[in-house]
Amino acid sequence: MKIFLVMRGTGLDGGGGAERRFGRLFTFFSVNRKPDLDVYLVTNRVLAQRLIMCGIVDSDAERLIYPEEEMGILAFNRWLIHMVRYHRPDVVHLVLIQRSLLPFYLWLLTNRSVVVVSTLASASIALDGRCSLMQAVTAHIVWAKSRIIDSLYPGTEKSIRLTPWKDRVRISPCSFSDYSQYKPSPAKTNTIVFAGRLSEVKNPMLLLRAIANINQSEPDLLARWRVAIYGKGELERDVISFIDKYGLRGSITVASVNSMTSVLSESRVFVSLQHVDNYPSQSLLEAMACENVVIATDVGNTRLLVNENTGILIHPSTYSLSEALSRVMHDWDAYAPCATRARLYVIENHSVDRFASYLLKVWIEGVST
């Protein structure tokens, strides 16, 4: 059985959780070869190079396919169509629902012989949250063609948006990361980290308001800590404007990196503040693996990853976050056992072996349906 994992991207510094996860899945299948199973990663040159640079994918991986030069959107879509025609995969697995691949999706829709499995990695789309008309239309085209819809989010099968295709929905049993890379450093620093796309759904402004409160009420406490925001997105200007308005340049930095490994290994606190669902955020999973004390909004399926034993759950309000941060900043050592339990929990429950076994069954079901 020949599988094409298809995705396109410009980098990993504005999020990239699904790209990292499926890059690692590709590497897992490349190293742990199975008879009669060939898994290919088909992507654009920029994303392939980023995955290689971060050590997620080997540069000499036999089944990594990408064009020799970076292409425009239409040219890349034509190249994808050519690759599918040439290689004739048994399953085309769409890792993300991407508007930039709409021409490819429309071509797939007209080719009945091509078996498609798609992954739903957006909580807003999966759980009837806000999304643009273009996102909704693109998703409907993908779902109409998909024999199986793999979703990260329990409850997707009840989504109104997915009603016509609810019988095709399968729920992933877990997420995963590379725990040999994501592990705590002995040289941890007083750093609070936010990592993810700077968008409304990720809610970075909540962190800024909480830090402004702490700066006003306990400036000496904040002076002993550093806040680091990693990511890009439509709220980037708002984030920087807020920092300047409240005089927080000395306390908060905004940056982007291809790999969060060293950042999360050395930080002490990680915040995940999404409006809809923090489960199963790749950055949150990696922060827990690095023994950060995690503070997460108690929404959606978040408790499947963070509970009172592995982190701190809060109401999504400025007061709740300020209070939780203040407690941890005053006495991080008291919460260190919680961080240790968090690492053990993700290693035991969120493994690539478990996810790969599930996905292999999904591919077989897709071909057999």
Image: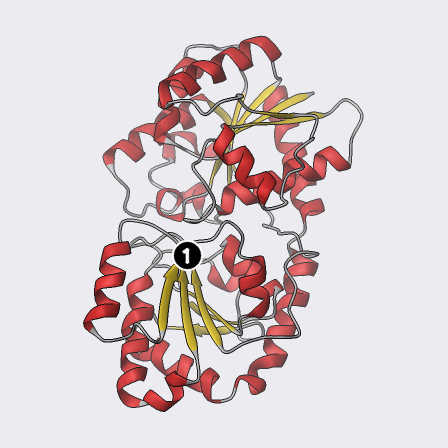
In the current view of this chain or complex, which residue is farthest to the right? 35
Q: Secondary structure at mark 1?
A: loop
Q: Is residue 75 above or below residue 343?
A: above
Q: Is residue 322 above or below residue 353?
A: below
Residue depicted at 67% across the width and 33% down the height: 360
Quadrant location of the N terminus in the rendered image = top right
Q: Tell me which residue sits at (39%, 32%) in the image.
A: 98
Residue wearing tag 1: 277
* Location of residue 25 by image quarter: top right
On the picture, is 99 further left or further right than 293? left
Q: Residue at x 51, y 29 (%)?
A: 45
Is 368 on the left-hand or right-hand side of 215?
A: right
Task: Please tell me which residue lies in front, 128 or 330.
Answer: 330
Name, please, the residue furthest toward the left: 245
Which percent across, then down, holds residue 171?
A: 54, 43
Front one among 156 and 212: 212
Q: Nearer the viewer, residue 256 or 334?
A: 256
Locate residue 271: give its quadrant: bottom left
